[in-house]
Amino acid sequence: MQFPLRPLRKEAARGPLGVKMRIAVHAGICLALAGLPVGSAVVAAPAGVVAEGARNVQGGRAVQVLVAQAEIRSNINPSNIAVATGGGLIGGMLAASQNASRTKKAEGLIEPVREALSDFDVDGLAQRTTGAALARVPWLQAAPVSFSKDSSPLGKSAALDSIGAGQIAFIEYSYDFSPDFAELRVVATVEFANKAMPAAATKPEARVSRKNLAYSQRVTTIVAAPFVVDEKSGNASLWAADGGKAAREALTLAFAEMEELLPRTLALTADQVAAMGAKTNKKSDVGGFQGRVQDSPTGETLLWGPGFIWYSGLN
């Protein structure tokens, strides 16, 4: 099901600070999605492709599936008051207050959805999805797979010590709603971490820091609610109705697409990644994520962010 693409906005229509405001907010969102604190320096990026020569590692490779959260999350558009007022203590306090208010409202809207999904086993779905996906990756088929709720650096470091393999492929899932509750989103972050301590490292958890990862890539699947409306409360009600029927279907669909895109991601070559990220592919944004438009043989919207971003909707 093809959805109209949303062209990126290049101009601000609300005064001379508009462009800077939008850039600052988008930068904060990108850092947050990458798991980095806003304002932090960008560290060395790990490989975004598993080269053929790196598919087999000394000591073998294990897989750990991670789902840290216990229930679906809400989300908000971060306040831009601090930027609009030039920053400082007052601007920061106003922004924090507005963010707190937005979070409280979002939590109130999402609670009925959480109750409707209380018996929906996302942890099990993530494990089944990963197993089916890795069965399509020849060099990962025999890897032992474990599951954990602890996705902290200490938890990942402990896994490296406890699992008898030279490297672990961490596949961490998160799931939430877009700020307007129009879409349900699932993100899988795939990271390869080596058991051996990196040079000059003093703490074991340094092995799972971004700069020391052997590989990192992300897959995002987004499902739009049926009959999306302009009001957050209306969209939230759609997800909660009939025992969470739409939310259950969306989660099932989002993970089903993960099963397709994870093997494709792990098989990518450097040339393919370069071609998908080429400037000749127009940019667009869907469900709060931005990327370059790709061909989609099944008709749904597919972007490269980097990382695949798939977008569809419920009938």
Image (cartoon, rainbow, N blue to C red):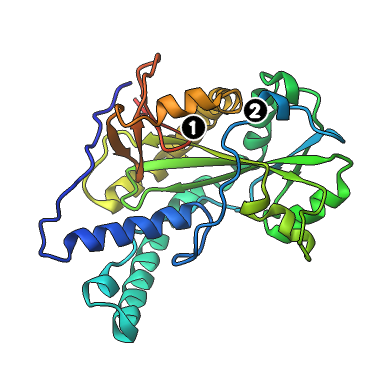
Residue at the image point whose x is 64% and y is 47% from the top: 67
Label 2 element class: loop
Quadrant containing the C terminus is top left
Residue pointed to by mark 1: 254
- Amino acid found under the numbered disc labelled 2: Ala
Q: Residue 56, how many percent across, how many down?
A: 78, 27
Q: As rendered, which of 116 and 292 lies closer to the eye?
A: 292
Residue 279's image quarter?
top left
Confirm whether residue 109 shows in the render. no
Q: As rendered, which of 231 and 283 lies closer to the eye?
A: 283
264 versus 115 height, above or below: above
| Labels in figure, total | 2
Q: As rendered, which of 201 and 4 lies closer to the eye?
A: 201
- The first of marks 1 and 2 along the sequence is 2
Residue at the image point whose x is 31% and y is 62% from the top: 24
- Amino acid found under the numbered disc labelled 1: Ala
Residue 76's image quarter?
bottom left
Answer few, some or many: residues within 10 Å of disc 2's Cα (few below 14, many 20 plus, some between 14 and 19).
Answer: some
Q: Residue 72, how many percent across, how many down?
A: 51, 50
Residue pointed to by mark 2: 51
- Circles 1 and 2: CB distance less than 8 Å? no
Judge left or right: residue 290 versus residue 157.
left
Q: As rendered, which of 90 and 223 lies closer to the eye?
A: 90
Judge left or right: residue 76 versus residue 220.
left
